Amino acid sequence: MSAPAKQEFKGSNEYVASQELLSAVNIAMTLEKPLLLKGEPGTGKTMLAQSVANSLGAKLYIWNIKSTTKAQDGLYVYDVVQRLYDSQFGGEGVDNIEKYVHLGQVGEAFESEDRCILLIDEIDKADLEFPNDLLWELDQMEFTIPQTGRTVKAKQRPVIIITSNAEKELPDAFLRRCIFHYIDFPEEDLMRRIIAVHYPKLEQRLLDQAIAAFYWVRSLPSIQKKPSTSELIDWIRALTYSGIPYDEIQRQIPFAGVLLKKNEDLDALEKAKERRARKF
Amino acid sequence: MFTGFFYYLRSCGLKVSLQEWLMLCEALDKGLAGASFLRFYQLCRAVLVKSEADYDKFDTAFVQYFQEIAKGSDEMPADLLKWLDSPGQTPNNYDEEIAQLNSLLTPEEIEQMLRERMQEQDSEHNGGSYWIGTGGMSTFGNAGNSPTGIRVGGKSMHHRALRVAGERKYRDFTKDRALDIRQFQLALRHLRQYSNRTDEEKTELNAEKTADATADNAGTLDLVYERPRRNTVKVVMMMDSGGSMEYYSKLCSTLFQAVSKSNRFKDLKIYYFHNCIYTHLYTTPSCSYAHSVPVDTVLRTLNRDYKLILVGDAEMAPYELLSDRYPSAGGVRGLDHLLHVRDHFSHCVWLNPSKGDDYWYIPESYTAIQKEFDMYYLTVENLTKAMKKLIAAR
C-alpha cells in the first residue's frame, strides 16, 4: 500500500485547539476511523469540523441529527411520491429509478471525488438504536440502494467527525469503532488565545477583568448551566460596546443575561455577589 | 508487544476490547506515537477509552503500569517528579561543608547515590541535605544549593506523559458503571403501545390504500397518507425521596435519568413523596411545602390509563404506614392512601432499590406494602419484567 501524502491538521487561524485535540484529530485521520467528540455545550465541537475542512481545503458535509432522524436518511432517500406523480402526468424518465434516488449527506460524502469531511452533528439526539444502524456503513464505507441495486462505495474515505452532547449513552459496538476525545473546558491561557482570535485588538485590562469574572461565575456551585466559551465571546462584545469602566466589570458583572440563560442562575449570581460584597 | 498493558487495563475494570487493542497496534505501527511518551499516552487514551467517565481510571492505570517500568529502568517515577515540581518551601540552608563535600564527587558516584536513594526514599523531602527534593543541599533534585548534582524534575521534558496522567484531572467524571443508563433505557423500551390514533399530521404514505384509491378514481392518482404510529403510553412516576432512600440515590438517579431522557412516552409526570404518600405529593425531590400539590388534584388531572411506577424502599416506622393518627396522615392510614392512589390507575408497579433484607430484620412496612403491590427489586432484569407487567392486559 503506498502511503498517501500525509496531511496533518495543525489548527487554524480561526480555531484554537489544545494539543491533545489536535493529536486526536490526526490519529483519527491516519487510522481512518470516525472521531467521536464529547464535551460541554459551547466548547466548539461543531466548529472543529469546519476548521479541519478549511485547513485541509476539503469540502464539508454536515448531517444534523434530530430526534426523528433515521439512519437511512443520511444514506439516500427514495422519492416515491414524485415518481408516482411523474408517471401520472407522463413526465420523462419515469423508468429511471435512479432519478428518484437522492443521496443523503453520507452518500454525498462517499461519492465525493476528493477526500472530504463528514460531520455527524449531535448523534445522541437520535433514537437509541441509531448509531448501531450505521455500523456497517461507517466501517466498510459503502452501502447498497435496493431500489436500483447500485452500491455506493467511498472513493476516498472521508474524515468522519461525530459530536455528542451526552444526552444518551452510545452503544458499545459503536464506541469500539471510534477514536474518542473529550473536549475539556479551556483553561485560562487557552481561553486567552481563543479570545485573541476573535478580538485581536482587545484591551488587556478589559480582558483580564472579563476572564476573572467569567471563571468566578463558572466556579459558583449554585449555577446550573455554566456559561461557555461562546457566551463569553458574546459577553465581551457587549462589554466593549457598553463602555463600562473596566474596574466595575468584575464587581458588577453587567449584562449577566448574556452569560446566564436561566432565571434561577441569575438569582443565584445576585446572591453570590451579595455574599462576596459582604466578605470584602 | 506489551500485551501485559492490555490485560492490566482490563484488570483495572476498563472495557478495552481486542478490536481497540489492534487499532492501537496499527496506530503504533504507523508511527503515530512518534518518539514521545506524551503522544503515546494521548494515543492510548484516544483509542482505548471511550468515555470521559473512564479517563480517571485510565490515568491511574497508566501511571501505575508505567511507573513499574520506570523503576526497572532507572527512570523517574511520576510522584517523585510531582514533588519536585511544586516545592513546598524555599529554605535558606546553604552549608559550606556539604558544598565542599559534594563538589568532590564524580558524576558516576552521584548517579550511584541517586539510584540508592530512589530505592530508599518513599516520601516528599524538601530543603534537606540527604534526600531527593527541592531547594535542598543534597546532590539530587532541583532548585537546590549544591554545586554539583543531578537535576531531577523541573523543566526536563522526559516523562511528561506520566506527569500529565498523574494529575488525574478527570477524577470528577468517574462514576460507578455497574448499572448503565443505557441498559435501563433498553428495559424501558418494553413499555410501548403503538397506535396511529394520535393528533399528528398524516405523513406516511400507505401504498396499498393508495393503489385502491387510485383504482377507484379510474386511474387518476390519489395518494393516501396515514398518521405515523407512535408510542401512546403515558407514565406517572412517584419517587420516595430523602431519609433511608439516600443509600440508593445513585441507583435512583440512574433510573430517573433513564426514564426522563427516554422521551419515548406520550406523557411523563414525576412526583415525589417522603416515605409514604399521604394527602400531598411534591414536585421537587426536596419535598418542601412550597412545592406540594394535593393528591386529589394530581389524580383528577391524570386519567386511569396512566401507568403508575412507584419507586421507594418501603422502609418506615410502622406507625407511619399503619396508624391513622400519624400527624401528616390526615386521619387515614398511610397504607390506605397508597391503595387509593394505586386503585386510581389501571396498571401499577412498585420498584424497590432495596431487597428489604439490608437490616437485621425485614421491616414490617416492607411486608405490608409488598402484600398490596407488585414489588420488584430494582435490577435491569426485573425492570424489564416490571415494564411487561405494566403493559400486559389485566
Image: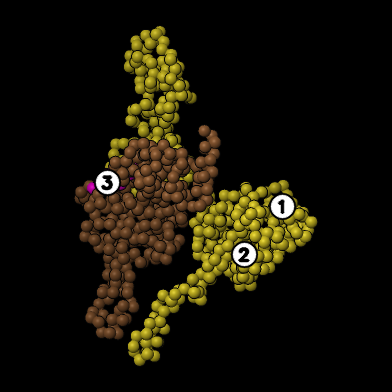
Chain in brown in the render: A
The three-letter amino acid code for the residue at tag 3 is: Ser
State the image coordinates of residue A80 (x, y, percent, origin top left).
33, 77
Q: Amino acid at mark 2?
A: Leu
How far apart are the alpha carbons under marks 2 and 3? Answer: 54 Å
Q: Is residue B360 left or right of residue A198?
A: right
Tell me where the magenta segment starts and ends, as one range.
A7-20
Residue B45 in view, yes or no:
no
The residue tagged with tag 3: helix, strand or loop?
A: loop
Q: Say which label, 2 or 1, has the lower sequence index.
A: 2
Mark drawn on residue A221: none
Residue B316's mark?
1
Q: Is residue A181 above or below residue A207?
A: below
Q: What residue is disc 2 on?
A: B308
Output the letter for the chain in yellow. B
Which chain is home to disc 1?
A: B
Give the vertical position of A232 relative to A79 (above or below). Answer: above
